[in-house]
Image (tube, rainbow, N blue to C red):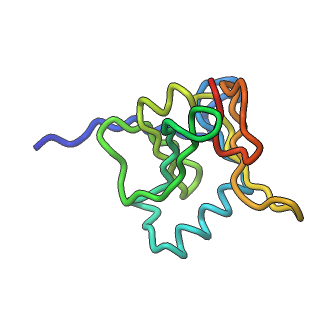
């Protein structure tokens, strides 16, 4: 059995205008806390960002932890935090910024996506 070919991208070496995935420092800190709470190993696992069909605007963001990357995933490294993106989701997510906000009105991850032409009020679905 051959080892999967993984594309590992170091976020610190990416220019801001490159079409990758960016994660703010606030989001990285929140991901670290959640990974520790869920028992996800930072050396093997990471945060999986994806897109699924559905939601009020046509496409929904999917965010969860995964114990390891899949064979064709793009892997983004932000210090000790890894983010996995499958090839189909990358079509809709490249150029996106993942942020975390904590206000009186809202607490959670915020997807700043340049491909979103229309989004719903909850911010968890969009049209491209």
Residue 113 lies in quadrant? top right
Is the C terminus in the top left, top right, bottom left or bottom right quadrant? top right
Q: List x then y, in percent, for residue 25.
A: 72, 53
Frontmost residue, 82 versus 47: 47
Q: List x then y, in percent, for residue 59.
A: 56, 34
Residue sticking out furthest to the right:
104
Query: Up-down: is 115 above or below 43?
Result: above
Residue placed at 44% from the left, 68% from the top? 40
Frontmost residue, 101 versus 124: 124
Residue placed at 47% from the left, 56% from the top? 46
Residue placed at 87% from the left, 60% from the top? 105
Is the N terminus in the top left, top right, bottom left or bottom right quadrant? top left
Residue placed at 36% from the left, 48% from the top? 69
Q: List x then y, in percent, for residue 51.
A: 51, 38
Count the numbered circles shown.
Answer: 0
Frontmost residue, 3 versus 122: 122
């Amino acid at each position: 059995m051959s080892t999967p070919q993984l594309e590992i991208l170091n976020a610190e070496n990416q220019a801001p205008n490159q079409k990758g995935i960016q994660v703010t420092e606030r989001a990285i800190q929140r991901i670290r806390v959640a990974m520790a709470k869920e028992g996800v190993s930072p050396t093997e696992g990471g945060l999986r960002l994806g897109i699924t069909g559905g939601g009020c605007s046509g496409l929904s963001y999917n965010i969860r932890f995964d114990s390891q990357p899949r064979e064709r995933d793009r892997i983004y490294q932000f210090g000790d935090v890894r983010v996995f993106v499958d090839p189909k989701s990358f079509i809709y997510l490249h150029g996106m910024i993942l942020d975390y906000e904590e206000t009186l009105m809202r607490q959670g991850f915020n997807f700043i996506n340049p491909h979103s032409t229309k989004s719903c009020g909850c911010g968890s679905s969009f049209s491209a």
